[in-house]
Image (tube, rainbow, N blue to C red):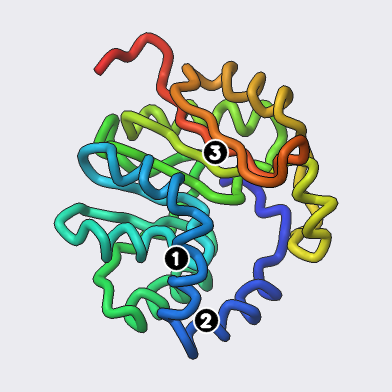
Amino acid sequence: LVEQKHDPSRWLDKWQFYLQAPEVFLGDYLPRMALFLSWIMKTGGNILEIGAGTGRASILIKRLQPYRQVVAADINPAICDFICKYARACNVELEVVQCDMARLPFPNMVFGAIFSEGVMEHYDDNQIVEMLKEQTRVAEYAMLSVPLDHFHRAHPNSEYGDERWYNKPTWINILKASGQILDLSFTGTIGEDETLWAVVEAYGRHF
């Protein structure tokens, strides 16, 4: 298993508030992540979210595309339990799986897309490359959202404490080592981009 470098307990305590107004927090999340979610939903086949956290992205996708299989996965059982509660509060039937994203318990190419948000920055370069290769083993496309170094300056209270605050060129080099970059987008103010969104495909694969 990939060692957990942070304790999610303080985040779970914060997330309990979401259950009191589940639709409000879904509504707050959607406009901020609309482009990234649209990339995911344009793919075909099943969808897997890893390091799913609150599960908001998976819940939204399942609500917008109820005909698709959407799986939310996390290594922490308490987080998986929270996702189940949040999905039920939103009247969404979501499949939740506890697993290690470094060793995904799924056959090759069973998903159309696999995605993560605010996950990869917690690991070192080699781990990120290997995990993205594992993701493109089970899915046609791997999509990720990660904070850039400017995010750290703008949101100092949103940290676990083990993030790797890379700039754009560093992340692009890591992604190139993982596969073919098919799409990139950056959010934030001009010249101070805070977040990178990317789509990566395995080398040598053609669709």
**Which residue type does callout 1 highlight?**
Arg
Dot 2 falls on a residue whose secondary structure is: helix
* Residue at 36 percent of width and 46 percent of height: 38
- State the mark number for residue 150: none
Dot 1 falls on a residue whose secondary structure is: helix
> Quarter-wise, where is residue 203 in the image?
top left
* Residue at 73 percent of width and 25 percent of height: 170
Whole-percent x, y for residue 104 in the image: 41, 42
> Quarter-wise, where is residue 12 in the image?
bottom right
Outermost bottom residue: 20
- State the mark number for residue 18: 2
Task: Select label 2 or label 3 by which is in front.
Answer: 3
Sequence-first disc among 1 and 2: 2
**Which residue type does callout 2 highlight?**
Tyr
Whole-percent x, y for residue 141 in the image: 37, 31
Q: Nearer the viewer, residue 112 or 2?
A: 112
Residue that mark 3 sits on: 197
Q: Nearer the viewer, residue 62 or 104?
A: 62
Whole-percent x, y for residue 129 in the image: 59, 26
Dot 3 falls on a residue whose secondary structure is: strand
In this rendering, position of residue 123 left or right of residue 132:
right
In this rendering, position of residue 100 left or right of residue 58:
right
In this rendering, position of residue 113 left or right of residue 203:
left
How far is disc 1 from disc 2 in space, using C-alphas?
10 Å
- State the mark number for residue 56: 1
* Residue at 42 percent of width and 56 percent of height: 73
- Quarter of the image with the C terminus is top left
> Quarter-wise, where is residue 135 in the image?
top left
